[in-house]
Amino acid sequence: MQTSTNKYLLLAITMVANFFNPFTGSAVNIALPQLAAELNLHVGAMSWVTMAYLLASAAFLVPMGKIGDHWGRRSIFLWGSVVFMLASFACALTVNAAGLISFRLLQGLGGAMMVSVSMAILMAAFEPGERGLMIGLNVASVYLGLSAAPVLGGLLTDYWGWRSLFYINGTVSIFVTIALFFTIRPEKRQPATTPFDWKGASWYVISLLLLMYGLSRLPQPLAVVAALIGLFGLIGFIRLELKTTAPVLNVRMFRHNKVFGLSNLSAFINYAATFAVGFLLSLYLQYVKLLTPREAGLLMMAQPVMMALVSVIAGRLSTKFSPAGLSSVGMMISVVGLLLMAFLNETSPQAYILTALAVLGVGFGLFSSPNTNVVMSSVDHSNYGVASATLATMRNLGMVFSMAVATLAVHVFIGDKVIGAETLTSYLHASRLVFFLFAGFCAAGVFTSMKRM
């Protein structure tokens, strides 16, 4: 084991991990029709293939970050890579829906373990003057993963089948795990000054899982009960954390820092209103427009490409103009993009679909970087780690909520039927309703975003 950390190799490894985490979450959307045909999945199960990964990521991101602070970030990152690797191969080898969804949950846990500590490890390895470029490269790798997911996911699915997505993830994870083992030096363990908040962490994870499961299965009676228990559990979790000396999630920051709270709320709303677009549009393009996975992926690439391009420009503009104002404008543009999506039908031309995706990408890109700037600028240097983890949690919760809303709408219109010729009209009605709801979310987000100004 080497005695010092090779920080540039470490940066490359974390960039690879940051590429494949969003790639894993998004690329599977392209493969859903093929996957559903082979495993005989109804539309509810299809949504859970995507949502299971996001739900586990959202539930375990904060607890794993805290555990890393107590027991060593290197160990959490390394074991997270191992869990992610094993879960990826298990997903590739599964033969039924229950197995796939279970292993996707495990994959999300592994991803959360890596993401929760990666930035802290890099901050410790790089000097203050080098951190700006390091952070920029890591953010770029995330956007690159999102941009590549539709295209690479479509190509892999088209030529080698949906299982190839997980084989690729597992194979890359082998090399990442080996490189991590020899790259990150063992940490000098510091005794914890405060006990880990096991009660809060358990309450948070269980409540979130119950709430999101319940929302995804409404209007079934048991789902209503689960959702209500989860909702009241999260309210109880907030009350508990306010009384805890060393909480797993510092909710006091939301109470005492208005800008921080509203910016995180705006991030939640933005992701809640936009993430499920990929899920809904992938099904629309392949079932309604009859495109191949590769063709659908190429078309869907318009949104993340515009998002990546605009986010770089918006990041620079946010240093010269009001970042809160820029992110508010971005949210307004997203409303327009979602309204365009709401009018998709059987005869919508590809030019219209590309335009709607491009507008949505511009809106998201103009929102994301400036809003991150607002969040990080609203706290003291000593709270950068907490602010970053909190923002990541809001992002993941928004994604899960977005999928829960989409799943609920599709379930209400289609039930447990398989998407086919007889259910396409119902599917279009469901997706249209969701896009209108998402546009409403974004409109509310404009209000919360502008309240910071």
Image (cartoon, rainbow, N blue to C red):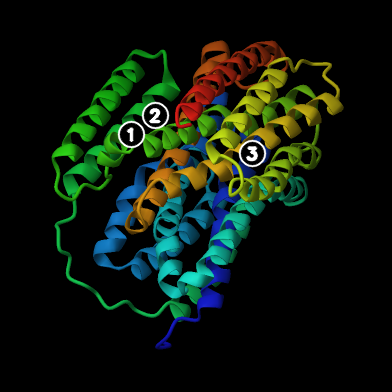
Q: Secondary structure at mark 3?
A: helix
Residue 375 is left or right of residue 300, and the answer is left
Residue that mark 2 sits on: 212
The percent position of residue 2, horizontal first and vertical second, equals 43, 88
**Which amino acid type is marked by label 2?**
Met
The percent position of residue 242, horizontal first and vertical second, equals 18, 38
The percent position of residue 412, horizontal first and vertical second, equals 52, 12
Asked whether disc 2 touches disc 3, contact meaning CB atoms under 8 Å apart, the reply is no
Establish if 124 lies above or below 300.
below
Q: Nearer the viewer, residue 421 or 259?
A: 259
As drawn, which residue projects farthest toward the front?
Answer: 320
Judged by depth in the image, the label closer to the viewer, 1 or 3, is: 3
Q: What is the distance, in whole Å, between disc 1 and disc 3 at their CAs?
A: 30 Å
**Which amino acid type is marked by label 1?**
Leu
The mark found on residue 366 in the picture is: 3
Q: For the N terminus, which image quadrant? A: bottom left
Asked whether disc 1 touches disc 3, contact meaning CB atoms under 8 Å apart, the reply is no
Establish if 342 lies above or below 164.
above
Q: What is the distance, in whole Å, between disc 2 and disc 1 at their CAs?
A: 6 Å
Q: What is the distance, in whole Å, between disc 2 and disc 3 at their CAs?
A: 29 Å
Residue density around tag 2, few if under 14, some if 14–19, many if 20 or more, within 10 Å: many
Residue 27 is left or right of residue 90, and the answer is right
The mark found on residue 422 in the picture is: none
